Amino acid sequence: MEYTGRCVAVSEPNSPTLVAMKYRKFGDSPELRQLIRDVIRVECRPYPSMQPPPLGYCLKMIPPGFLLLPLLRQIIIIIIIIIIIIIIIIIIITAGCAVASALF
């Protein structure tokens, strides 16, 4: 793992490759999709020592892991949508607090 202060690069982690082998053998399933999400969370977890927090993560996968790319794309899009929704909620709450404090 390398950390540049802006991006974390993880070189050839085994976990995506192992999940890809499971995908190749058993196919797609809800359990596999959950396993992929868990792998992303583990490989891209923040460390308290990384200050400021990184802006992005780069997973360099080896060819057997490429089988997961279509599934990873779907899961990453869902994660991005969830993050956008959380940001919108935070903005709404912050704006509501500002309005309430201005009134009182």
Image (cartoon, helix red, strand yellow):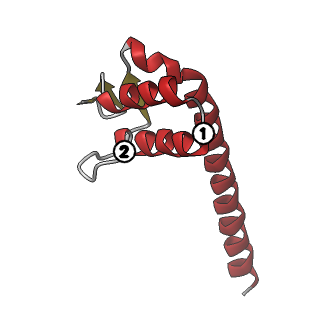
Residue at image coords 65%, 41%: 78
**In x, y percent, where is residue 64?**
41, 16
Q: Which residue is mark 1?
A: 29
Q: Quadrant of the N terminus?
A: top left
**In x, y percent, where is residue 84?**
66, 47
> Measured along the vertical axis of the image, is residue 64 above or below residue 56?
above
Q: Is residue 101 left or right of residue 31?
A: right
Q: Which residue is mark 2?
A: 42
> Measured along the vertical axis of the image, is residue 67 above or below residue 92?
above
Name the foreground residue: 50 vs 83: 83
Q: Is residue 1 left or right of residue 62?
A: left
Mark 2 → mark 1, Cα distance in angstroms:
20 Å
Label 1: how many Cα within 10 Å (few below 14, some 14–19, many 20+):
few
> Measured along the vertical axis of the image, is residue 11 above or below residue 56?
above
Residue 91, disc? none
Residue at image coords 44%, 33%: 56
Q: Amino acid at mark 2?
A: Val
Residue at image coords 44%, 46%: 38
* Kind of element beneath mark 1: loop
Q: Earlier in the sequence, mark 2 or mark 1?
A: 1
> Measured along the vertical axis of the image, is residue 9 above or below residue 40?
above
Q: Quadrant of residue 79?
A: top right
Tell which tag, 2 or 1, sits nearer the viewer.
Answer: 1
